[in-house]
Image (tube, rainbow, N blue to C red):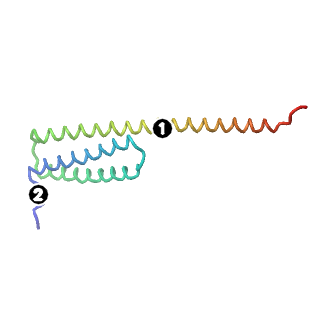
Amino acid sequence: MGNNKLSEDDLILILKKKLSILHEWLQLSQRQLVTIEDMDALLLQKDQCLEALIRVDGLTETWQKQNPRTWNEKEVQLQDQIRQKLQEILDSEQATEEKLMLERGQLSLELKQLREQSSLKNYLNSAKKVPRRK
């Protein structure tokens, strides 16, 4: 059997992998903000990022159990970068949600205007059918 113990140096690799996945997720989130085309593909890719993050978090937990020590400066810096990337993703996701809500509101307004125009057309058409006095 192979050695499944994670070395102390593996934590940096794990944290860099997590940062890389988060960077990919941020890019997808930002693309989602500027386009609604191909939304299903973007959501699928974001789901894949989430699955990868769950696996990496599992590795981090395993590493911490196997290597109970405080993190060194480089590891702490990477964790800070991860927190910053998570905040950027959160901000991007919130901006996307706000954009979609605004677009939804605009669409509702346009539908209302179309209904009103349709009602006006119906009224005008019915007014044409009213017999005129001679």
Q: Quadrant location of the C terminus?
A: top right
* Cα distance in 3D space between marks 2 and 1: 51 Å
The disc placed on residue 45 is none
The N terminus lies in quadrant: bottom left
- Residue reaching furthest to the front: 134
Q: Nearer the viewer, residue 7 or 105?
A: 105
Q: Residue at x 21, y 45 (%)?
A: 19
Decide if residue 87 is on the left or right side of residue 109.
Answer: left
Q: Residue furthest bottom?
A: 1
Residue 27 in picture, x, y percent from top left: 30, 44
Neighbour tally class for label 2: few under 14, some 14-19, many 20 plus, Cα within 10 Å: few
Q: Amino acid at mark 1?
A: Glu
Question: What residue is shown with label 1?
Answer: 103
Task: Report the amino acid beneath label 2.
Answer: Lys
Q: Say which residue appears at 29% left-offset and 46% top-offset.
A: 25
Q: Position of residue 93 (x, y in %)?
A: 36, 40
Q: Nearer the viewer, residue 96 or 6?
A: 96
Which marked residue is nearer to the observer: mark 2 or mark 1? Answer: 1
Q: Secondary structure at mark 1?
A: helix
Out of 122 and 44, give the one closest to the viewer: 122
Label of residue 5 in the image: 2
User: What residue appears at the point 44 percent right and 39 percent down from the top-left corner?
Assistant: 100
* Residue sitting at x 46%, y 37%: 101
Residue 61 lies, with reference to residue 129, above or below; the image says below
